Amino acid sequence: MRKIVLISCVSVKLDHKARAEDLYVSPLFKYSLSYAKSLKPDMIYILSAKYGLLELDNIIEPYNTTLNTMSSDAIKSWSEKVLIRLKEKINLDSDQIIFLAGDNYRKYLIPHIKNYTIPLFGLGIGKQLKFLKEHAGKKYEQRKLQ
């Protein structure tokens, strides 16, 4: 069983093309990524509203798309595309999936995944940041200073 982390995209981005892990610049994303790396997973993917499933080193353009303003049908369609890509990369029956993503990014994926956890479930943005800072903040701050 492999450990896989899925992080949702965020609205705050660089204004130019960059690697996916560098494009998203909000504290929530940076702390989520730091926390994800601290878990020593086999793989980390980004759930992008525009691009679907991204690897950290994918080079992408900035965009202004979010699932939070999409209809349920559009989110279902997005989820189906992400599931196709996930099935190519991981085993949905045996791999452990850790979601660092909001409800819109996970609700139609979860029914297809047997083993998953949502460490930030039920937490508002402030409590999410607090949790992430406490669990991975020092590592993020050290990288930020370098």
Image: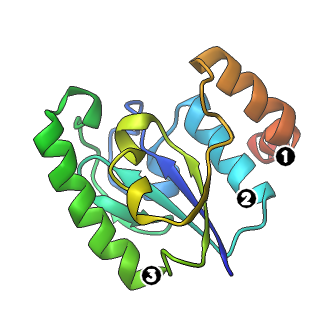
Q: Quadrant of residue 132?
A: top right
The vertical placement of 75 against 21, above or below, is above
Q: Nearer the viewer, mark 1 or mark 2?
A: 2
- Name the amino acid type tagged 2: Lys
Q: Which residue corresponds to the image point at 60% horizontal and 58% vertical from the top-left?
A: 116
Q: Which residue is mark 1?
A: 139
Left or right, 98 with respect to 81, comes to: right
Question: x and y percent of residue 127 in the render?
Answer: 69, 19
Residue 96 percent location from the top left of the image: 64, 68
> Circle 1 — which element?
helix
Query: Label 3 vs label 2: CA separation?
Result: 18 Å
Other residues around mark 2 within 10 Å, as few (<14) / some (14–19) / many (≥20)? some
User: Toward the viewer: 13 or 116?
Assistant: 116
Q: Earlier in the sequence, mark 1 or mark 2?
A: 2
Disc 1 marks a residue whose amino acid type is Lys
Sequence-first disc among 3 and 1: 3
Query: Is there CB contact under 8 Å for labels 1 and 2?
Result: yes
